[in-house]
Image (tube, rainbow, N blue to C red):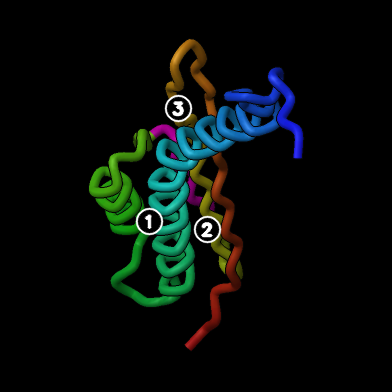
Amino acid sequence: MTRRWFERGDVPVGCLVGLVVLLVVAMVAIKVAPLMINVGELDKEISTLADRANRREYKDPRILADILRKAEDLDLPVTKKDVSIKRTSKRIKITVTYDISIEFPGYTYVWHKEHFHDRPLIEI
């Protein structure tokens, strides 16, 4: 079995490229995964509040305060002007729109997020 001198100690280029891709994916996942979990929790809370909007104690100011409190707990940049609550006699529409800046080395990505929930108001 002969050994070729140019193979000794060589690192395949594909291995290095794969390692770089793996590092980039890991860095993105570490930055983005907690934000996506927090956005999902806020969406779940907005959905719950929209479902409860039929009850007497769930008026628009309370729903707004609950949304802002949950967003503050999750460290999401939601302000009072980002929340829109439109209530008619038969429906409630809650819209929350905000931007999240995700900073990577050398690049800042701005993620525009919009939550929209439209629920019927059932007369009891």
Q: Nearer the viewer, residue 7 or 24?
A: 7
Q: What residue is pinned by disc 3?
A: 102
Element carrying mark 3: strand
How packed is label 3: few (under 14 Cα within 10 Å), some, or many (20 or more)? some
Residue 43 placement (x, y as % from top left): 47, 57
Q: Is residue 91 left or right of residue 53?
A: right
What residue would you read off at disc 1?
Answer: 60
Question: Residues under labels 3 and 1: Cα distance?
Answer: 31 Å
Q: Earlier in the sequence, mark 3 or mark 1?
A: 1
Please state which of the two labelled residues, at mark 3 or mark 1, is closer to the viewer: 3
User: Dot 1: few (<14), some (14–19), or many (≥20) neighbours within 10 Å?
Assistant: some
CA–CA distance in space, label 2 to label 1: 8 Å
Q: What residue is rendered at 45% in x and 27% in y?
A: 102
Residue farthest toward the bottom in the current orientation of the protein: 124
For the residue pair 61 and 41, the one nearer the viewer reads as: 41
Instruction: Say which quadrant the N terminus sits in.
Output: top right
Q: Position of residue 100 (x, y in %)?
A: 45, 31
Q: Amino acid at mark 2?
A: Arg
Start-end of magenta stretch: 81-86
The disc placed on residue 87 is 2
Point out which mark residue 25 bears: none
Above or below 104: residue 89: below
User: Is disc 1 placed on a helix, strand or loop?
Assistant: helix
Please say if the residues under marks 2 and 1 sit with CB atoms less than 8 Å apart: yes
State how far apart marks 2 and 3 are (Cα). Answer: 33 Å
Which amino acid lies under the numbered mark 3 shown in the image of this protein? Ile
Residue drawn at (24%, 48%), measured in percent from left and top?
73
Q: Is residue 40 magenta?
A: no
